[in-house]
Amino acid sequence: MKRRDFLKWIAVAGVGSAVGSWWWPFRESQTLVLITDQPRRDLAQLSPLLEAGSDPWEVEYYPVDALPQDVTLIRNGVLMDPVKGVAVPGLVTRLAREMRQRHRPGYTLILARPAVRTREEGVEIRVDGVLFARLDGTRNYDRIDVPGPMGKTVLRYRDGKMQVIQSSCRHRLCEQMGPMAQGKLICAPNRLLVTLAPTSLDAVVG
C-alpha cells in the first residue's frame, strides 16, 4: 500500500517518549496509527512498546470506511513508513509487514500515543512548518481558510473545539472525525499541522 493512500487526514495528540534504546532517543511528538479489522490482537502485539517506560499511552478508536490495513508512524508531524523508516522499533516494522499482507479491509482506526503532559493556551496553525496563524483559544472562528499543496482546507473553531468543515482530500476522513478539543490535527498531503490547547477541554469527540 502506498503512503499517499494510507491515510490523508488523521487526528493525533500527545508528546513524550517511551524509554529504551530500541525507541527514539529524544523527546518528540509521536503517534502510532493503525487501520485494522483486529484491534485487540494488533494492539497486543504492540504491548511491549505501549507498556514501556513511566509515561502512560492513550489509545483511541474511530470507525472508518473500508481501507487497506496498515500501521504507520507520525513523528513531529511527518508521516513515516515503519518498513522504510530509520530508528523504528522492530515490533512496529513486523506488524506493518504482516498487516500489509492481509486482504480484508480494516474498519477501525486506532491512535496510540503517549499521554499529554503539557498545558498550553491558544491554537497554532502551521503549513509546511511555517506559522500560518495563531488563534486566541477563548474566541470563536466560524471560517478559517488554509491553503495547501493539495488544495484548500476550511476549519472552524468554536467553543474550544476545532473542526474540519471542508477538505480537499477525496477520503474526507477528517470531516468524519468531528470537533477536536485537544491534541494535534495533521494533514500529511497538505503539510498542515494544527496544535490545540488542552486547557479548554470540555469534551472529547471520538
Image (tube, rainbow, N blue to C red):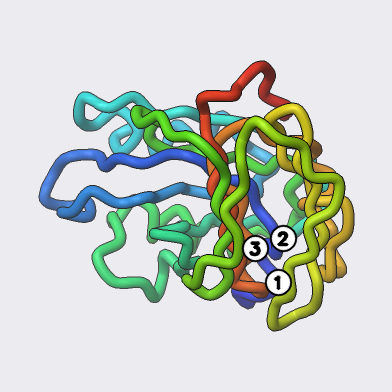
Relative to 17, 66 lies left or right? right
Q: Position of residue 161 (x, y in %)?
A: 71, 33
Residue 182 horizontal/vertical position (percent): 58, 33
Please name the residue shown 69% across and 58% down the image: 9
Q: Which residue is mark 3?
A: 187
Q: Nearer the viewer, residue 63 or 189?
A: 189
Q: Would you say residue 138 is visible in this rendering?
A: yes
User: Residue 83 or 94: which is nearer the viewer?
Assistant: 83
Q: Quadrant of the N terminus?
A: bottom right
Dot 3 alpha-carbon crowd within 10 angstroms: few under 14, some 14 to 19, many 20 or more: many
Secondary structure at numbered mark 3: strand
Q: Please give the name of the residue rendered at 49% of the width and 72% of the height, measured from the top-left corner.
A: 130
Q: Quadrant of residue 171?
A: bottom right
52 on left or right of 84: left
Instruction: For residue 1, say whether it is visible.
Output: no
Q: Are discs 2 and 1 less than 8 Å apart at CB?
A: yes
Q: Secondary structure at mark 1?
A: helix
State the residue at coordinates (44%, 32%). 44
